[in-house]
Amino acid sequence: MQQNVYKVPAEAKSRAHIDNDRYLEMYQQSVEDPEGFWREQGQRIDWFSPYSKVKNTSFKPGDITIKWFEDGTLNACYNCVDRHLAERGDKTAIIWEGDDPSVSEEISYKQLHAEVSRFANGLKKLGVEKGDRVAIYMPMVPEAAYAMLACARIGAVHTVIFGGFSPNAIADRVNDCGVKVVITSDEGRRGGKTTPLKANVDEALKDNRCPSVEHVVVAKVTHGDVAFDEQRDIWWDQLVKDVATECQPEVMNAEDPLFILYTSGSTGKPKGVLHTTGGYMVWASMTHEYVFDYHEEDVYWCAADVGWITGHTYIVYGPLANGATTLVFEGLPTYPGVGRIGEVVDKHGVNILYTAPTAIRALMAKGTAAADTSSRKSLRTLGSVGEPINPEAWEWYYKVMGDSRCPIVDTWWQTETGGIMITPLPGATDLKPGSATRPFFGVQPALVDADGNELEGAVDGNLVIKDSWPGQSRTLWGDHERFEQTYFSAYKNLYFSGDGARRDEDDYFWITGRVDDVLNVSGHRLGTAEIESVLVEHPAISEAAVVGYPHDLKGQGIYVYLIAMSGTEVSDDLTKEVREWVRKELSPIATPDFIHWAPDLPKTRSGKIMRRILRKIAANEFENLGDTSTLADPSVVDSLIENRLNK
Ligand code: WT7
């Protein structure tokens, strides 16, 4: 196969913080002397009292310990806001671009400081104290960032819940970490449509389903009608009306929790990934600066949602820690037309654009129309995140959106890693479309076989990380055992990512995707077990098995095998109803793409569903089904194939 290589442009190299020589030198130091390297790098953020200890980490079975800068004290909000006031008080911190293209707003660091401090005082008035958990269920409006930063300011632990989640999903998350206050808005607004956020919160909390919740703060976004419980609910503007604009940031230990973010795993309910303060802030700010080659005068846009880790680290904490101008976008890349991204770039002079392959493929489907209504001449660096980017989409992004001028950083990382792990650097790394290339400083990736033996050279394997890095998740909320079980039990003394990868002859990494029962649908991470448990709650369904299959736009689609309750008549209406059920009970992002009613599922004699076979059938690969001799009833496979072909 012919392989295009894009050399570092001379211009990118000359302006960059890091060129290739510097990358190699710093990388070597970061892995040979992590103590010394991070002792120095930790200085990039402001500490109230300095750390004397740098790294205290162990991946040993029974003793998973991850502590960085553990005796230092600081405040994340202070680092994102207060420390910029002297030099950058009037600089724009946030550009808010509304769903409606005629609506935008600029918020200076001074204004950000006032908004965040007032809201922090409001939270205090509601009784929120250091260590309390606060849920944020909001659309992409500046208030979402204010709420996160206000929590950080007073030492409350936020858990942002993606605005696309259903009431049940909200209730699960709120109950798992005992949330005291929920912050939401009347409605959300995207692509010209509204979503009933407040009503979803009401539904989640009704009948005392979430007994820990004392108050719900409601921001007015659309001014739509909502039900209001005078005892429990309070309007945002009411809450901040008579409070002081000064709020002393709480002194936090480096290892005090900053936030919990729920993500899907291969089994059971979502996991509350915990990030703490010091190491996370160092990682967020350092990766933001070097990976995007961020410079002081840049306008930076990460088109993710704050409901995901990408929004936490690369819309809020990383860029604001660096005193950047960060763009918060309420809308959709295709609304009102496919030209929107380029139009927003031109409107605000965006220099750095960070988005997801799923958005890129949606635009690519319209040829070059996405570029017809804009010049995008301000763009300098492009980024990709969330799933493997196919070389065709990479080339389109490079040529059409970037006019063959802008290096693309394809950044591999995860909710659990806190920030970017494997990535090109714009001024240092020659690019190969589809490859996330090389590790960031301090990251030691390796490939292992099924038994955990490290593989050398150009080879395929399971992607593990050999030692800790400051941005790493510390634990799962309230369940350190599950943390160890999930990430450190497959391979001893190694962090297992759940991804497969290939290393090529230039030591470049190519992420091939999840090797566990986790799906990546349009960059959204979903556990098959999670979807299955919602499905079997439907009265007409007796058994369900969910697998992913290749999908042109979404990367992976959701393929659902269902066995109906005996006596149930399977009809198109029922299929439609099941689809609606998943949307409502879990989330629209989990809506099945393909529903396959089957008389039976392929199981081993011990009753275990053979997902390997289900994946092949879903992918229309009927050859090489592998060994089916251990099946209890091999004829099940033939009937599944027949059914698949008839669709
Ligand atoms: C999973 C993590 C990273 C923040 C957003 C998603 C996949 C992520 C890439 C990439 C190939 C990627 C992996 C990973 N993934 N980035 N550049 N190339 N795959 O965070 O929801 O925790 O999902 O997303 O499979 O394990 P997440």
Image (cartoon, rainbow, N blue to C red):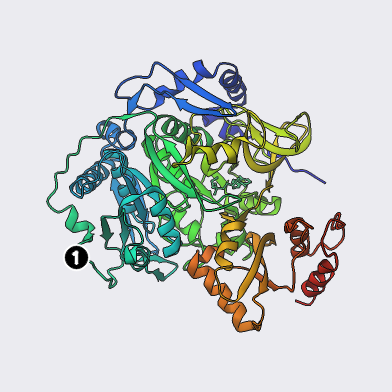
Q: Is residue 325 visible?
A: yes
Figure quadrant of residue 276: top left
Q: Is residue 300 visible?
A: no
Q: Is residue 581 above or below residue 278?
A: below
| Disc 1, SS | loop
Q: Is residue 313 above or below residue 584?
A: above
Q: Is mark 1 within 8 Å of ligand 1?
A: no
On screen, residue 535 versus residue 480, left or right, reads: right
- Circle 1 residues within 10 Å: few <14, some 14–19, many ≥20: few
Q: Position of residue 633 (x, y in %)?
A: 83, 65
Number of residue marks: 1
Q: Identify the residue at the far front of this view.
A: 606
Depth check: give the residue in front, 20 or 504. 504
- The residue sitting at 46% across, 26% down in the picture is 67
Q: Position of residue 215 (x, y in %)?
A: 25, 56
Q: Position of residue 3 (x, y in %)?
A: 77, 43
Q: Which residue is mark 1?
A: 230
Q: Amino acid at mark 1?
A: Glu
On screen, residue 116 versus residue 377, left or right, reads: left
On screen, residue 273 versus residue 111, left or right, reads: right
Location of the C terminus (image quadrant): bottom right
Depth check: give the residue in front, 568 or 50. 568
Q: Identify the residue at the far left of this view.
A: 242
Depth check: give the residue in front, 350 or 71. 71
Q: Position of residue 313 (x, y in %)?
A: 45, 42
- The residue sitting at 26% across, 55% down in the picture is 214
Figure quadrant of residue 21: top right
Depth check: give the residue in front, 615 or 608. 608
- The residue sitting at 34% across, 50% down in the picture is 179
